[in-house]
Image: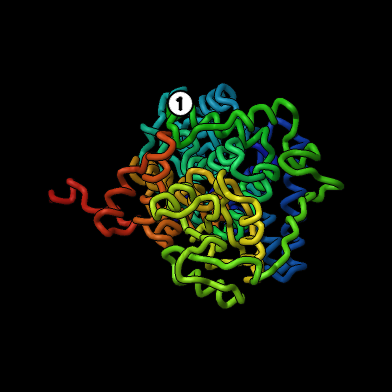
Amino acid sequence: MMGTKRIRIIGAGAMGRGIAQIAVVAGFAVELTDVSDDAVTAGLDFVGTMLRRSVEKGQRTAQEADAALARLERGASPTAAADDVDLVIEAVVENLEVKQALFAQLEKAVPGAVLASNTSSLPITTIASALHEPSRLLGMHFFNPVPLMKLVEVIPGLRTDPDAVATALRFVEAVGHRPVVATDTPGFLVNHIGRALPTEALTLLSEQVASEVDIDRIVRDTLGLKMGPFELMDLTGLDVSHPVMEIVSSGFYGDPRLRPSALAAVRVAAGLLGRKTGAGFYRYVDGRQQVPPEPTLNPDAAATRIYVHDHPEFAAVLRAGGADVVDKPTADSVTVVLPVGEPTYRTAARAGLDASRTVGIDPLSIAGTRLTVTVPARLDPEAGRAALGVLAATGRAVTVTADGPAPVAQRVLASIVNLACAIAEQGIGRPDDIDVAARSGLGYPSGPLELGEAHGPTVVLRILDGLLDYTDDPRYRASRWLRERAEQGMSLRDSGTRPEQLFD
C-alpha cells in the first residue's frame, strides 16, 4: 500500500490482536504493543495459532503463514520513539482521558505516523483536541472478531487532514475489509443505525402489544432478520446495549427516534443482562436459550365463514386452505382486514365493519411462513378462536398480538427505514455506506434503505404518518429524506441534486 509499510498496534486484546492478524497477512510489518508484556505474549501466540489453523484448513500455505508471522514483532513499548512507523492503531480501554494522554505522547514519539483510534463510541474530535496536530488523528473502528467482520468505520474528526483519511481507507482496503466513512457523531454509523430495532421492540413490549418471543418471531419471519431484537440484546448483553442507547440518545439531545426504554434500565439494575448472566429476556440453561413453545392451534378451515375486506390476494390464500370465503360479511362470519399504519379497529370502522367480529392480518406477513394476527379490544373471543382455526389451516405459523397503533412488523420496518433516512439526511453516512454498514456491521440481510425500497417508500411513509397521527409521538415523524423521495417517486438511495452541483 502506497506510503504505509510499518504499523504499530497499541492494545493486544481481542481487537488489537485481530487487527495485527489481518495486517501481517496483508503484507504489513506490525509492532504489537501493550502496557502488559503478558498481553503482548498472549497476542503473539494467538496470531500464530490462528495462522497455523488457517494452514490446516487449506486457507494458505505454510510458507505464507511463516512469512506473515515473520512480519509480526513485539514492539518496544506503546509510546516508543520511531521514525519508520507510518500508522498507529490504538485499541485500548474506552476511556477518553486514557486515549488523550496516549495520543499526546504518540504525536511526539512517531512524528511521521497517521494516528487512529479504534474507539466505538468516543468522539474523535474530542480525543484529537488534546493534540498539537489534531489533523493527524481519525477513527478507525473495527468490529469483533476482526478477521471475520469485514467492515471498518473510518471517522474523520472536524480537523482531520484528508490525506490521513486517504491513508486509512487504503489500509482498510489493503487488508481486505470494506471501509465506510462516517461523520464524527454519537454512535458513528453502525451503532446509530442499530438503535431503531431494539428501541422500537422495547416500545412494543412496554405497550404490551406482544411478548418478547413473539416480537422476535415476527421480526425474523416477516422482515427476514437473522435474530430478533430481544435475542440479540441477550447475546450482546443489556449492560452493553442499553448504555449505547443512552449515549446515542443523549448525544443527539433526546431525538425521539433514539429514545431508550425504562424497561431496559430496570433490567440492567436487576442483573438480567442476557446469556452472560443466565437470564435476560430469555432464560438460559447451560448456555442454551429456553424458548417458550408456540401456542397450540387447531387447524379447522370450516370453523367459520370468512369475509376478507379489500384484499382478493389473501382471500385466495384462505380459499386454497379450504376456507369458506364469502363475498360480504354475514351475522355468522368473521371479517379479516389488513391494516396499514393504523389499528385494526380503525380499519374496520372506516369500512363500516363490526369490530367485535373482525381480526387483522398484517399484510407484510402474508407472503411469508408466519401470519401475524391483531386482536381488537372489542373482539368476541369465540369469533377470534374460530378465525384462528381457519388461519392455521393455511399451514402457516400464526402469531397473535394486541391491536396496537400498527402491526408489529410495520412498526419495526418503519422505524429502521426512517432512522436510516434521517442519517442520510444529516450526512452522517452516504446511502450506499448506510446499507453496507447495516449488512456487514449488524448482520441485516439487506440494508435499511434497501429494505425500504423493497416494501416501497410510499408504504413506509404511510405507516409512519399513521403512527404519528394515532400516537402523537414525534418518534414516528417521517424524515424529510423519506418524505421527499416517497412523494417524488425517487429511490431512497438517491442523494438527489444538491445546490453545489449547479456550480462548476
x and y, in percent, of residue 45 in the image: 77, 49
Relative to 300, is 15 above or below?
above
- Mark 1 sits on what residue? 126
Query: As rendered, which of 333 and 25 lies closer to the eye?
Result: 333
x and y, in percent, of residue 258 in the image: 48, 35
Residue at 55%, 32% (x, y): give it.
Answer: 260
Which residue ends up furthest to the left in the rendered image? 503
Q: Is residue 159 visible?
A: yes
Relative to 259, is 413 above or below?
below
**What secondary structure is marked by label 1?**
helix
Residue at 73%, 39% (x, y): give it.
Answer: 280
Query: As rendered, which of 349 and 258 lies closer to the eye?
Result: 349
Q: Is residue 85 visible?
A: no
Left or right of 113? Residue 268 is right
User: In the image, what residue type sits under mark 1?
Assistant: Thr
Residue at 75%, 30% (x, y): give it.
Answer: 271
Snapshot colouring:
rainbow
The quadrant where residue 51 appears: bottom right
x and y, in percent, of residue 117 in the image: 53, 36
Residue at 36%, 56% (x, y): give it.
Answer: 457
Query: As rendered, which of 131 and 108 lies closer to the eye?
Result: 131
x and y, in percent, of residue 79 in the image: 59, 30
The quadrant where residue 98 appears: top right
Left or right of 428? Residue 212 is right
